[in-house]
Amino acid sequence: PNVRVDLVHTTGAPDLRNADVAIFWSDLGSPNHDSETLFQMECVPVAKPGLCAVDQFIGAGVSPLHYGDHKTWREWLDRKGLPTEFADEGVVFDDQHLLFEAAAHGRGVAMGLFPFIANLVDAGRLTPVSNQAIPSRRGYLLKVINPDNPAANSFADWIRFAVSAQPDARPIVAIDGD
């Protein structure tokens, strides 16, 4: 009751002037957000099952596939101590669905975000091709802009409950904590 929900997809900082509650995708830990992370996501390379052996895609004639930019691949490679030049190769997609469809059809290795790709992995369309994931530097944030509105607080509480009730959708790989 008395809660209006608008779904807005935007690149860059969201316009929160007309909102009581906002859920938005952003870099985590930004000092400008004054918000809370809804859930932690993990990055792991994924590909069509059988495309390449685990941790054997670099130098095997398999290209990286990117969403938006090369940063996530570069960060993952750097954290693993692998040559970051691999991230300079490959196609950059502006749509995640196309990215994962390309990976599922054997066009290369994509950096997948769990839990977003859990259904594709469960269905056997994609498989992790590394034994380690890293925490994503991006995620969904929740911000109550108008805490004086009881409906806004109720909606935010409902979102927190819904997120906490979800089963843990982590990949079947080790999570790198270094």
Image (tube, grey):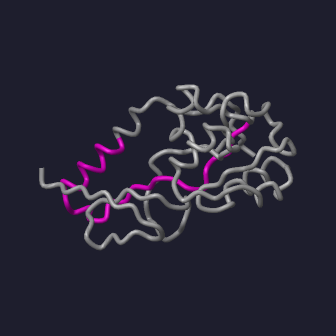
Q: Does the magenta run of residues contain 146?
A: yes
Q: Position of residue 141 (x, y in %)?
A: 44, 55
24 relative position to 104: left or right? left
| Residue in front for this viewpoint, 87 or 90 | 90
* Residue occupying the point 37% across, 56% down: 23
45 relative position to 54: left or right? left
* Residue occupying the point 25% across, 49% down: 155
10 relative position to 64: left or right? left
| Residue in front for this viewpoint, 130 or 103 | 103
Q: Position of residue 17 (x, y in %)?
A: 29, 73
71 to 18, vertically: above or below: above
* Residue occupying the point 33% across, 70% down: 16
* Residue occupying the point 28% across, 43% down: 158
Tag count: 0
163 to 20, vertically: above or below: above
177 to 37, vertically: above or below: above
| Residue in front for this viewpoint, 8 or 108 | 108
Q: Position of residue 94 (x, y in %)?
A: 54, 59
Tell which residue pokes out farthest to the left in this image.
Answer: 1
Q: Position of residue 143 (x, y in %)?
A: 37, 59
The image quadrant that residue 117 belongs to is: top right
Q: Which residues are magenta?
A: 132-160
Q: Does the magenta run of residues contain 142?
A: yes
